[in-house]
Image: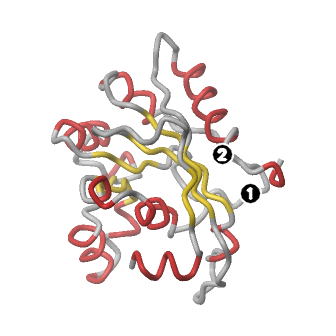
Amino acid sequence: MLGAARWLTGVRAVWPEGGLPSGPCVFFGNHVSHGDFALIWSVLPLSLRDRTRPVAGADYWEKDALRRYVGRRVVRGVLIERDPAKRTLDPIAQMSDVLRAGESLILFPEGTRNLTDAPLLPLKSGLFHLGKMHPEIPLVPVWIDNLHRVLPKGELLPVPLLCTARFGAPIDIGNDDKETFLSRAAAAMLDLRPASAH
């Protein structure tokens, strides 16, 4: 899967000046394709990749046996039930357990794929609550560029194009309230966009 992601996208990573955190962290990025987490995962150093788990919608990854196998066993996804009426587990508690176990997360705070012309959808509150619960965990913004053109919604065959995953300097909650922090988190992602996307 990682080889396919690299071959189709020619993905390259752009790291922050200080490098990536050595311990558990939360990578949070823009969400334009089902391949987003694979792209981020594929560029992480092996030692970090082995300790990083994507957060994904259970409704998608539980649809059939193959997806369940890949979601649970291959990528060890933290599968979140997005419909509050169907939840039996607290999503923040699920993610928190992973961080307490010394592993990192890949999270898409928009909550769903962005199929609009806006660069970002409004961010959900999960990133804020997770950061409040774990103020010691660095929150690392990521911007994925071009992947929505590689794997457009509704298409079965990907189109080979070059993609970039840009990682920013970690941020934390500080003393921000929810709205202030989510605005700052969105700005941290948007600041990583290439100049041609502005």
Q: Quadrant of the N terminus?
A: bottom left
What amino acid does circle 2 point to? Answer: Leu
**Helix, strand, or loop for circle 2?**
loop
Q: Residue furthest left?
A: 101
Pointers 2 and 1 in contact (C-beta within 8 Å): yes
Q: Relative to residue 184, is residue 198 drawn left or right? A: right
Q: Nearer the viewer, residue 176 or 87?
A: 176
Q: Relative to residue 86, is residue 116 drawn left or right? A: right
**Helix, strand, or loop for circle 1?**
loop
Q: Relative to residue 55, is residue 186 drawn left or right? A: right
Find residue 152 and report its horizontal and vertical position in percent: 66, 75
Find residue 5 and report its horizontal and vertical position in percent: 49, 76
Residue at (21%, 71%) from the top-left corner?
73
Instruction: Estimate how packed mark 1 is, as few (under 14), some (14 to 19) or many (20 or more) residues with alpha carbons within 10 Å.
Output: few
Instruction: Give me the disc on residue 121.
Output: 2
Find residue 3 and report its horizontal and vertical position in percent: 42, 80
Q: Which residue is mark 1?
A: 116
Snapshot quadrant of residue 155? bottom right
From the viewer's perspective, is residue 169 above or below residue 165? Answer: above
From the viewer's perspective, is residue 163 above or below residue 150? Answer: above
Residue at (25%, 72%) from the top-left corner?
74
From the viewer's perspective, is residue 62 above or below residue 81? Answer: below
Q: Nearer the viewer, residue 109 or 1?
A: 1
Residue at (37%, 45%) from the top-left corner?
84
Find residue 95 and report its horizontal and vertical position in percent: 28, 42
Q: Residue furthest bottom?
A: 157
Q: CA distance from mark 2 to mark 1?
A: 8 Å
Q: How many marks?
A: 2
